Image (cartoon, grey):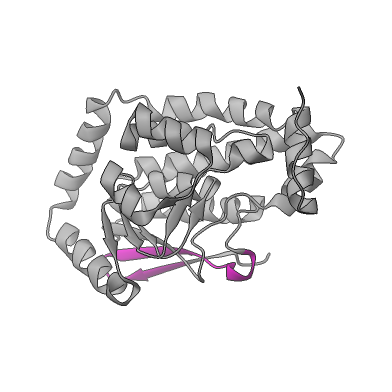
């Protein structure tokens, strides 16, 4: 099996890294399965007290692998394949969100589509000032359904609607203004700031931090995992439409899509 991720542990700090920089860290099903396995093991471990989610290369994550999506579209069991992809992605988001230890997304470059979901499932987000955030799904004829509940939780309905419906790029600075990320630093200071934040969290009690995370979730309704599961079906169904097939084909052919009336 090709290694598309890397898990490391340095004392109490765990680090999970996307390692497919030549493909802009696009998420194949295999990538998600590897993330799922790492997170499952991490949830049962005692030693790690903070998780850092990071990526190699200039792009944090470009979202789902569009070549693999095209294969799904051409499959005779396309809906079953879409459903499986959605389930695995949903599992990863739910695992990240519900880990008992604090999680930090170290966003050193652009995060798009499903990559934004990985970022938002983490507790805290540090972004390089070279990073930006973008949800281009409508331009592909699909929706960012599973990103939506996490985005609403983080920034509220107004900013969420803007990012979801416009498909515009949001700079890291704009993300900071609305709460999508929590700190923006120059690349040369990125690791220094990340180290300072992880050390600050390590000064707290593991049990107290776990209780705080559970309490935060309860205070906003405690329904995130349910909302992710509900959104999973919306995501799979959206990929079955004629516009979804046209949007994907147009992107791969580098042309403007011809949408249905």
What range is drawn magenta here? 7-23
Give the left or right position of residue 184, taking residue 118 as reference.
left
Q: Residue 116 lies in magenta, yes or no?
A: no
Observer able to see residue 147: no
Residue sitting at 29 percent across and 50 percent down? Answer: 176
x and y, in percent, of residue 87 in the image: 59, 36
x and y, in percent, of residue 18 in the image: 52, 63
Q: Residue furthest bottom?
A: 188
Give the left or right position of residue 136, taking residue 220 as reference.
right
Foreground pick, 43 / 119? 119
Q: Residue 22 lies in magenta, yes or no?
A: yes
Residue sitting at 33 percent across and 58 percent down? Answer: 51
x and y, in percent, of residue 230 in the image: 52, 23
Foreground pick, 25 / 228? 25
Give the left or right position of residue 212, taking residue 261 as reference.
left
Give the left or right position of residue 193, taking residue 31 as reference.
left
Q: Is residue 28 above or below residue 212?
A: below
Q: Quadrant of residue 188?
A: bottom left
x and y, in percent, of residue 246 in the image: 78, 37
The quarter in which the C terminus is drawn is: top right
Q: Is residue 99 above or below residue 235?
A: below
């Amino acid at each position: 099996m090709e290694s598309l991720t890397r898990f490391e542990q340095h004392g109490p700090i765990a680090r999970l890294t996307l390692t497919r920089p030549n493909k802009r860290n696009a998420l194949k099903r295999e990538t998600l399965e590897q993330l799922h396995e790492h997170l499952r093991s991490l949830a049962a471990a005692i030693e790690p007290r903070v998780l850092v989610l990071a990526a190699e290369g200039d792009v944090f994550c470009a979202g789902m692998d569009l070549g693999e999506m095209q294969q799904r579209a051409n499959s005779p069991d396309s809906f079953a394949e879409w459903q499986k992809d959605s389930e695995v992605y949903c599992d990863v988001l739910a695992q990240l969100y519900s880990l008992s230890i604090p999680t930090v997304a170290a966003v050193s470059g652009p995060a798009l589509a499903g990559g934004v979901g990985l970022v938002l499932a983490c507790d805290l987000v540090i972004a390089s000032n070279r990073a930006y955030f973008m949800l281009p799904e409508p331009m592909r004829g699909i929706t960012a359904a599973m990103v939506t509940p996490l985005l609403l939780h983080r920034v509220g309905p107004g900013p969420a609607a803007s990012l979801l419906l416009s498909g515009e790029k949001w700079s890291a600075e704009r993300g900071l203004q609305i709460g999508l990320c929590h700190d923006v630093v120059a690349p040369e200071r990125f690791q220094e700031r990340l180290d300072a934040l992880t050390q600050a969290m390590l000064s707290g009690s593991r049990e107290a931090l776990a209780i705080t995370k559970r309490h935060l979730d309860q205070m906003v309704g405690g329904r995130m995992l349910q909302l992710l599961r509900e959104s999973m079906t919306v995501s799979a169904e959206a990929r079955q439409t004629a516009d979804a097939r046209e949007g994907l084909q147009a992107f791969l052919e580098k042309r403007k899509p011809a949408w249905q009336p």
